[in-house]
Image (cartoon, rainbow, N blue to C red):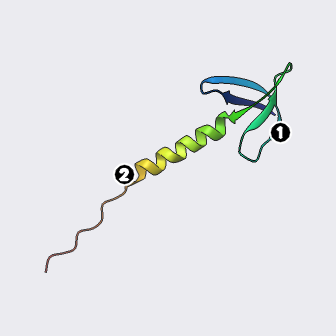
Amino acid sequence: MLTTITLAGRITAQGICLQDHADGRVTISTGTERLTGWPILRRLKAATAALALAILPLVSPPRPRPKPC
């Protein structure tokens, strides 16, 4: 399967997936060399999940006020 990974922050590489590592990284073959890095989709999903958890308290519905006696 064709996979895109990030290396050293903003550097990316694309190639055939060779191995999934236990820590979430992936090794790919570019045709001339093997590279190991973080898959783009997993990183994007993690960032999206973190953002959603950070925003959730800001958009949750307000609690109903108790009625005065």
Quadrant in which residue 24 is drawn: top right
The alpha-carbon separation of the residues under discs 2 and 1 comes to: 40 Å
Q: Amino acid at mark 2?
A: Val
Q: Image point 36% across, 51% down: which residue?
A: 59
Crowding near the residue tagged with mark 2, few <14, some 14–19, many ≥20 C-alpha atoms within 10 Å: few
Residue 35: give x, y in percent of width and height: 78, 27
- Of residues 36 and 62, the one nearer the viewer is 36
Q: Position of residue 12 (x, y in %)?
A: 67, 24
Which residue bears the numbered disc 2?
Answer: 59
Q: Residue furthest bottom?
A: 69
Secondary structure, mark 1, is strand
Measured as percent of width and height from the top left, residue 30 is found at: 82, 22
Image coordinates of residue 11 in percent, x first then y, are 64, 22
Query: At x 65% / y 37%, what residue is drawn?
Result: 41
Q: Quadrant of the N terminus?
A: top right
- The kind of secondary structure element at disc 2 is helix
**Quarter where residue 6 is shown:** top right
Kind of residue sitting beneath label 1: Gln
